[in-house]
Amino acid sequence: MTADKSKMTLWTRYFDSKLSRSEGRRVSKEASIPSPSLDSIVWAAREVGLSKMKRDVEASHPSRPHSKEGRLILSTKEAISVTQADSKEGVMKSIGLRLRHQYIEAKNDENPKQKQQKKGDKQVRSQRKSFKGKNSSQRKKRFGRK
């Protein structure tokens, strides 16, 4: 939290859907995404209509000094007027909803590419290699057994 009331600080962890509220998430699951980057939060803030912002990439939250997660510093007056919210929670929710919308669009765009697989690729896609037709000594050497 900044001492200056004219500034608002948003940490990336506030929008992480992998975390519980007690671990640092401050928006609902519907307004969060897994492992958000600072750039994606900046993009969502710009889409909402915010222009006065400052990125601090190397910043670490006071309760998590070991992780350099980054933060976004906004003008409180502009953020509340642009998003038409009552508080910081409303600003975070509007940014989070835009972030989630963008995440779902990106996820839907890449899914059709993954579904197109050829029928003959089953053997290539299998994780285990078949040892049929090979003698057992090759199998033992391959897995480090004597």
Image (spheres, grey):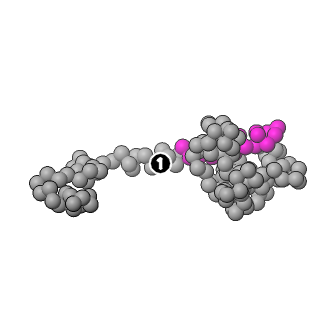
Which of 107/125 is in front?
125
The image shows residue 15 at horizontal and vertical percentages of: 65, 45
Which quadrant is home to the C terminus? bottom left
Which of 118/141 is in front?
141
- Horizontal relation, residue 130 to residue 5: left or right: left
Visible in this render: residue 61? yes
Q: Is residue 18 magenta?
A: no
- Horizontal relation, residue 132 to residue 23: left or right: left
- Residue sitting at x 62%, y 54%: 37
Look at mark 1 in the image and give the residue it sits on. Answer: 109
Q: Residues within 10 Å of mark 1 (few under 14, many from 20)?
A: few
Bounds of the magenta span?
Answer: 85-104
- Residue sitting at x 40%, y 46%: 112
- Horizontal relation, residue 58 to residue 78: left or right: left
Classify 141 as above or below 115: below
- Residue sitting at x 12%, y 57%: 135
The image shows residue 118 at horizontal and vertical percentages of: 26, 49
Tally of marks:
1
Kindly identify the amino acid type of the residue bearing the numbered disc 1.
Answer: Asp
- Residue sitting at x 20%, y 58%: 140
Quarter-of-image position of residue 59: bottom right
What is the secondary structure assignment of the residue under circle 1? helix
Q: Is residue 96 magenta?
A: yes
- Horizontal relation, residue 35 to residue 134: left or right: right
Please, what is the dominant secondary structure of the magenta stretch? helix
The image shows residue 32 at horizontal and vertical percentages of: 62, 42
Classify 79 as above or below 53: above
Visible in this render: residue 78? no
The image shows residue 145 at horizontal and vertical percentages of: 24, 58
